[in-house]
Image (cartoon, helix red, strand yellow):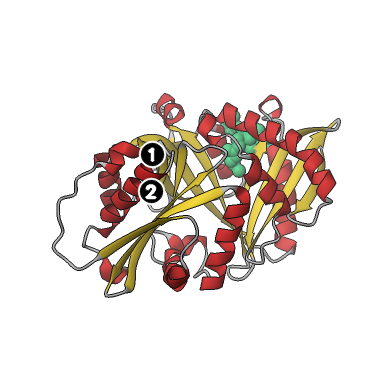
Amino acid sequence: MEITRIGSGLGDPAAIEALMPELLAFDTVVNRASGLGADFDPIPEDLRHSLTSTSRYRTTLTWIGRIDGVIVAKGVAELRLTSNTDTAEVWCGVHPDHRRRGLGSALLTVMENELRAEGRTALSSYCEIPESVRVAELRGAHLPTETGAGTLPVAVPEVAFLHRRGYGFAQIERCAVAPTATAAGLDLGADADDYVIETWRGPVPEQRLEHIALLKRRMSTDTPGAERFGGEESWDGERVSALDEEKKVRGEEMATALALLDGEPAGFTQVGHSADRPAVGWQGGTLVRREHRGHRLGARLKVANHRSLAERTAVERVYTWNAVENSWMLAINDQAGFSTWAWVGLWTKNRR
Ligand SMILES: CC(C)(COP(=O)(O)OP(=O)(O)OC[C@H]1O[C@@H](n2cnc3c(N)ncnc32)[C@H](O)[C@@H]1OP(=O)(O)O)[C@@H](O)C(=O)NCCC(=O)NCCS
């Protein structure tokens, strides 16, 4: 297998454009083989972004493996550039017709070695296992996470692969999907307190940039298990604006709900949706600051955001991810009509 690497924004634009259809076809085949469904097919603008972005905050490295000129494997590493510069989130996929011949291992080894040489020693990875696949393996042996919360069947190729490559199974998240209208209709009753919830769609308004930056900083430290995936992320208003600008270029819009108490940010939640697949929403981060927990703000924020989506966008269903430790949020999501779609294993490997 011949392996080449593209750093985002560093390739020849014409060559990247020429490569796009081939990579899109490869990503689609890998997704279809996974059983995750067409909602998870690659979005052309996201793929283009991963190859061409020149953001000063994040970058993507893409490795392409070919046999006889045809793409048989692809690896991706997401790198942060202004904080957590020793970390990388890696993923690789092999064409279903070429699996179990050592190609995944060969590609991941090249990726890990190159990343290590560039100072990226704290690696994380993930695998997404549809509920139907997990259920089919219920009788076989299961691997528990390091904290003991949740298991995945060892016979699933992606689980066997990451385990075999020396990754530790850190955490499991449930991916669930709900019709927007059901979640928007959840009646939480009234809350007798002074929290105010604002919603908007599109870029963060000027006067809220620093609020969102603060909440995003906290997101990197104040969520279950966050410390395993790196330290505090540096966020300021400028970075929040830059991210909005990137999303605009990709045809992606965010719907945001922000909770305020006396003008101070208490929590937020965001759902992204893309012009390319307007019926589908992707739950982004949700955070309630530690000092504001216990007021049902997580649920109130989510319901407000779903209402805003139902009233003002074409989003029909939303996918969400929750750590299985977060039983309180899972219960709220169940009430809001979410049903399990997949299980995501989060893995870490230290190469220092
Ligand atoms: C995970 C994936 C990349 C493995 O690619 P691959 O080329 O088949 O992997 P390899 O042949 O290098 O396998 C390496 C080891 O992983 C384990 N493994 C891989 N597939 C397995 C399977 N179907 N059953 C059991 N073990 C398996 C074995 O231990 C294997 O070593 P062995 O063949 O010496 O027993 C491939 O299944 C894939 O593309 N899955 C979809 C993408 C994805 O979810 N990636 C997440 C992980 S980054």
Instruction: Name the foreground residue: 257 vs 23.
Output: 257
* Chain-order first, disc 2 or disc 1: 1
Q: Quadrant of residue 54?
A: bottom right
Q: State the separation of the CA atoms marked 2 and 1.
A: 8 Å
Disc 2 target residue = 322
Locate residue 122 relative to residue 74 in the image: left or right.
left
Residue count near mark 2 (Cα–Cα under 10 Å), binned few <14, some 14–19, many ≥20 = many
Quadrant (top left/top right/bottom left/bottom right) for the C terminus: bottom right
- Label 1 residue SS: strand
The reply to whether dot 2 and dot 1 touch (C-beta < 8 Å) is yes
Query: Could you say where residue 175 lies in the image, as x and y percent from the top left?
Result: 41, 41
Q: Is mark 1 within 8 Å of ligand 1?
A: no
Locate residue 5 relative to residue 142 in the image: left or right.
right
Query: Could you say where residue 34 lies in the image, as x and y percent from the top left?
Result: 55, 30
Quadrant (top left/top right/bottom left/bottom right) for the N terminus: top right
Instruction: Name the foreground residue: 62 vs 297.
Output: 297
Instruction: Give the residue displayed 16% in from the left and 66% down from the top.
Output: 193
- Name the residue type under label 2: Asn
Q: Vertical placement of 40 versus 219: above or below?
A: above
Query: Could you say where residue 55 lies in the image, as x and y percent from the top left?
Result: 66, 62
Disc 1 target residue = 176
Instruction: Name the foreground residue: 226 vs 303.
Output: 303
